[in-house]
Amino acid sequence: MDDKGRIKVPASLAKQMEDFGGRGFCGLKRSVFQKCLEVYPIKHWDRLMEKINGLNRFPKEKCRFYTGLYRWVKTIELDNAGRIQISKDLIQYALLEKEIVITSAGELFEVWDKDSYETVITDSEDSFAQLAEEVMKENEG
């Protein structure tokens, strides 16, 4: 990440964004469960926003959910150098420093501070096999 908060998106991920109808546009939000950022190709982003916007807004707790979610949501564009601009509030949330890690996560990719990512990966190695078994068991016929 440079001093202006721009991150160079690896060419393979930039291509993936274009393949999903991105035309260089994408959605950016903080992860709900981890100290990282999630970047979606615009096609997936639009589908996610459509689903969220279709929820009933009237119960008070759902209204708080919308307020909290949209506080961290941005639509961004790849610049001509293949970079995305990360806002200061999201940089602070994800604890991003100079060294970052970009990981593919299916239809999106995640942006992590390198130290935070290594801590999460190290902490989860022991329990990953058990977690995988539980998740895969839930998906059985």
Image (cartoon, rainbow, N blue to C red):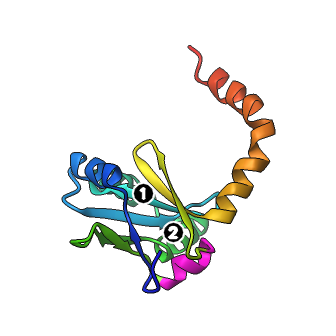
Counting from the top left corner in percent of width and height, residue 40 is at 38, 56
**Quick one: 26 or 1, which is closer to the camera?**
1
Please state which amino acid type lies under the numbered disc 1.
Ile
Counting from the top left corner in percent of width and height, residue 82 is at 28, 66
Q: Residues within 10 Å of mark 2 (few under 14, many from 20)?
A: some
Residue 77 in the image: above or below residue 130? below
Horizontal side, residue 27 vs residue 130: left or right: left
Is there CB contact under 8 Å for labels 2 and 1? yes
CA separation in Å, label 2 and label 1: 10 Å
Where disc 2 sits, the SS reads helix
**Which circle, 2 or 1, is nearer the viewer?**
2
Counting from the top left corner in percent of width and height, residue 114 is at 62, 63
Residue 10 badge: none
For label 1, the residue is 52
For label 2, the residue is 69
Say which residue appears at 43% left-offset and 76% top-offset.
Answer: 86
Magenta stretch bounds: 88-95
Name the dominant secondary structure of the magenta segment. Answer: helix
Please state which amino acid type lies under the numbered disc 2.
Leu
Specify the farthest residue to the top.
141
Tell me if residue 89 is in the magenta stretch: yes
**Quick one: 12 or 18, which is closer to the camera?**
12
Observer able to see residue 52: yes
Residue 64: quadrant of the picture = bottom right
Where disc 1 sits, the SS reads helix
**Quick one: 111 or 2, which is closer to the camera?**
2
Tell me if residue 5 is in the magenta stretch: no
Residue 62: quadrant of the picture = bottom right
Say which residue appears at 58% left-offset and 23% top-offset.
Answer: 139
